[in-house]
Image: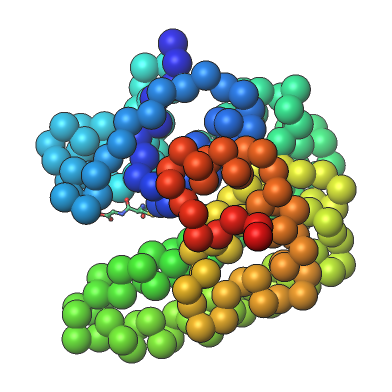
Amino acid sequence: MEPVLYYSPGAASMVVHWFLLELGAPHRLHLVDTSTGAQKSPEYLALNPNGVVPTLVLDGVPRFEAAALLMTLADRDPQHRFAPAFDDPQRAEYNQWMFHLANAVQPLFRNWGYPHEPAGEAQADAVRASVAPRIETCWERLDAQLAKQGPYLLGDRLTAADFYLAMLMRWSRNMPRPATTWPHLAPYITRMRARPGFIEVSRREGLVDWLNS
Ligand SMILES: N[C@@H](CCC(=O)N[C@@H](CS)C(=O)NCC(=O)O)C(=O)O
């Protein structure tokens, strides 16, 4: 049974879409039109009660949370080596970065993208102003990690965490200081964006504004 990805172009679903392409995994796409609130429809909420994308229907069961989906897909397809195995010494480091990106970095982007959520429309500017430097601190730490142990987050090994980080970096493209302005993140993302999977997911989702020139 082919997985079905419920997605919206450029949203958190993008990394799952990209990852399915990298795995060469047959899948079907179902567009969720977030501009009309389709993610809050009763039909969609029955799949994902959080009312957000992505949802991936795997073996007939709807699953949510982009980071968890990446980890599940990587573990189910070990020959691609996008996740260290359970007994691999790098598994702990991999778990650390996946959870750091999911718990520390992605929620800041939720506030950046939906600044009215924490305290209403009147506080939106203040929320954005407080979140931007916190996202920059994240880039500082991730840049330092790549400086210490590149070219990928786990050194020589490309993992699901790199696809995830690349998507989060993309979300900073219109911020006052985009992730691409850090010295080690810049060549890193040039490599990630050169991947045929990135070019293909950008083509499929119509994302024209963040390709290598
Ligand atoms: N933690 C969730 C976050 C998903 C999320 O916030 N998705 C956004 C797009 S990036 C969304 O669906 N927004 C529409 C809404 O909140 O109504 C995940 O990683 O899957």
Q: Is residue 208 left or right of residue 43?
A: right
As displayed, is residue 142 above or below residue 129? above
Identify the image quadrant of the C terminus.
bottom right
State which quadrant residue 24 falls in. top right
Q: Residue at x 44, y 67 (%)?
A: 109
Placement of 113 over or under 128, stated as above or below: above
The location of residue 142, given as percent across then percent down, is 70, 68
Q: Is residue 189 visible?
A: yes
Measured as percent of width and height from the top left, residue 100 is found at 60, 59
Farthest left residue in view = 42
* Residue at the front extreme of this rendering: 213
Residue 101 vs residue 191, the one in the foreground: 191
The quadrant of the rendering that contains the N terminus is top left
Q: Position of residue 67 (x, y in %)?
A: 52, 45
Residue situated furthest top in the rendering: 1
Residue 81: % across, % down: 76, 31
Q: Is residue 149 left or right of residue 159?
A: right
Q: Residue at x 27, y 40 (%)?
A: 32
Q: Is residue 33 left or right of residue 63?
A: left
Q: Residue at x 82, y 44 (%)?
A: 157
- Vertical relation: 184 (above or below) 207: below
Q: Within the image, what quadrant is residue 6 found in?
A: top left
Its colouring scheme is rainbow
* Residue ID at (73%, 27%): 80
Residue 98 visible, this orientation: no
Does 136 sit left or right of 186 as displayed? left
